Image: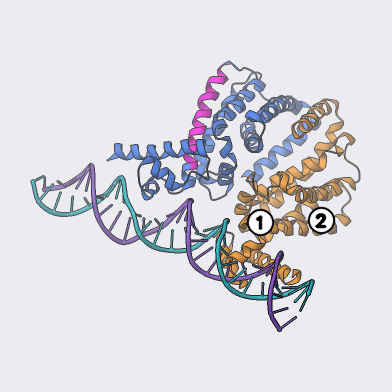
Chain colours: A blue, B orange, C cyan, D purple
Amino acid sequence: MTVKSEQTRQLVADVALRMFREIGFAKTTMRAIAAEAGISVGNAYYYFASKDDLVQELYLQVQAEHAARAAEALKDAGDLTGRLKATLHTGLDAMAPYHRFGGDFIATAIRPTSPVNPFAAGSTAAREASLAIFRTAVEAAKPQAPKKLRSDLPELLWLCYMAVTLFWVYDTSEGQQRTRRLVDGAVPLITRGLSLARIPGVGRILDDFLSLSRSIRG
Amino acid sequence: MTVKSEQTRQLVADVALRMFREIGFAKTTMRAIAAEAGISVGNAYYYFASKDDLVQELYLQVQAEHAARAAEALKDAGDLTGRLKATLHTGLDAMAPYHRFGGDFIATAIRPTSPVNPFAAGSTAAREASLAIFRTAVEAAKPQAPKKLRSDLPELLWLCYMAVTLFWVYDTSEGQQRTRRLVDGAVPLITRGLSLARIPGVGRILDDFLSLSRSIRG
DNA sequence: TACTTTTCTTGAACACGTTCAAATTGAGGG
DNA sequence: CCCTCAATTTGAACGTGTTCAAGAAAAGTA
C-alpha cells in the first residue's frame, strides 16, 4: 500500500514543518506533531527515525526552494558579482521562514553524527545539490573567473555560504538586514580579490593555498 | 557555610569533566554524575543550572589550560609564523582529551542561547580571555604585522581559530594529525599573505574588507 | 473466498534533563 | 542550651525523545 503510506509520511512532514515555522523547534514535540496529524507517536517514528530526520526533511525542502529561486534569479545576472549576490540572497530567502528555528537547526546540523550535517558523508547528495547551484553561478559567469581557480571556486564559495548562514542564524536585526548588507559588501570584495590572482606575488600564495586545500580534503 | 559548599561544587565539576573525558557526553547523565559524586540529582542542579553549565565549566578549564600552555610556548617564538603556530597548537593540545566529545560540545556551544556560545554576549569574558592570547601573539611578534591590520588582526585570527576548532571536531585522523598539518600549512600562508598588504592593488581591497568587517560588527 | 505474509499503526514503557516542595543541616544570637 | 533563619540537600514528579511488543490493515497467493 504505497499511496496511503506516502500520504501519511507527507502529512507528518507537512505538519512538522508548519509547526517548526509557527511555534519553533522546542515546542514542536513528537507528541504534538502526532496529535496534530491525528496519528500515534510510534507511527510518526515509522516514517522518521528521529526528530533530526524531520530537520533533514526541512533541509531538503529549503534547498529545493533555493535551487528554484536561484535558477530564476540567475537568468538575468551576467557577471560573477551579480550571480553570486543572487545565489546568496535567494539562499537567505529560502531560509527566511525558519529563522527563529535557526539556532536549533544549526545545533542539530553541526553534530558530526547528524544526518543533516553538510560536511558528513551521509549527506553527500544534499551537499552536491547545494554545490551545483554555486557551480552554475560560477561557470556561466562572464567574464570567467581566473583559470587556475575555476575548479575549486564553487566549493570555496559554498564554504562562504555556510559561513553566511552561520552569521544569519545569529543575526537578530529586523528581517536579518545585517546579513543582507554583509552579502552585498562581501561579494564585490571576493570578485575584486579574484582578479588579483594574476599579480605574481599573489598568484604564488594562491597556488600554495589551493594545493594545501586539496591536500587537506584528499 | 562556604567551604563545604565550594567542595561540593568542585566535586560535581571534577566528576562531570572526568566522565565527559572517559565515557563521553551522552553517557554522562546527570544521574550518573550525582551517583558517582555521592549526592542527589537535585543537589547537582543547585550548583549547575543545567548540563550545559557543566560544559561551560569545561570550556573555562580548557581555556585556562590553553592560556598557560600558550604563555609557555610563546616565550621562545619570535616571528609571527612561529607565534601563531604555537598559539594554535597549544590550543589543540588543551582540547585533545575531549576530542570524542567535540561534536556534542560544539552543538551545545553554537546555539545562540547557550551560555558557552563564543559569539554571544553572555560569554564576553571567556571570549576576551581567548582573544587576549592572540593579541599577545600578534603584539610581541617581530617583525610586526602591517600597521593598518594590527588592531583587527587578533580578532580575525581568533575567528580562524574557531574555524580550526570546527575542522578539528570533524577530524577523525589518528591524534587529529590532519588538523596539525592544516595549521602548519595555513599559518605560513597567512603570514605571507599579510605582507601583500603593502601592494597597492591588494591594499585597497584590504581597506574595504576591514571597513566592511568593522561596519558589520559595530 | 480463505489463508499467509508484509506493511502499517498503536500506546505503554524507558531513560533522560529538569523542577520543586519539603526535609535537613549549620551558623549566629539569646 | 535552644531558637531562628538561610543555605544546602533530597527524591519524587513532569514532559521530553525514543523504543518495541503487540495488534490491525492491506496485499499477495491459491
Q: Nearer the viewer, residue B181 or A126?
A: A126
Callout 1 amino acid: Asp
Residue B164 visible in the picture? yes
Callout 2 amino acid: Ala
The label number, if any, that marks residue B64 in the structure image: none
The answer to if A58 sits in the magenta stretch is yes
| Residue A75 appears left or right of B8 | left
* Mark 1 secondary-structure assignment: helix
A149 shown above or below B73: above
Magenta stretch: helix, strand or loop mostly: helix
Residues packed near mark 1 inside 10 Å, few (<14), some (14 to 19) or many (20 plus): some
Residues packed near mark 2 inside 10 Å, few (<14), some (14 to 19) or many (20 plus): many
Pointer 2 residue: B70
> Which residue is pictured at 53% across the width and 20% down the height?
A72
In percent of width and height, residue B167 lies at 65, 47
B167 shown above or below A67: below
The label number, if any, that marks residue B53 in the structure image: 1
Residue B172 visible in the picture? no
Q: Chain of mark 2?
A: B
Q: Say which quarter of the image contains residue C11.
A: bottom left
* Mark 2 secondary-structure assignment: helix
| Residue B204 appears left or right of B110 | right
Q: Which residues are magenta?
A: A55-75
A187 shown above or below A114: above
Q: Chain of mark 1?
A: B
Q: CA distance from mark 2 to mark 1?
A: 25 Å
Q: Nearer the viewer, residue B177 or D13?
A: D13
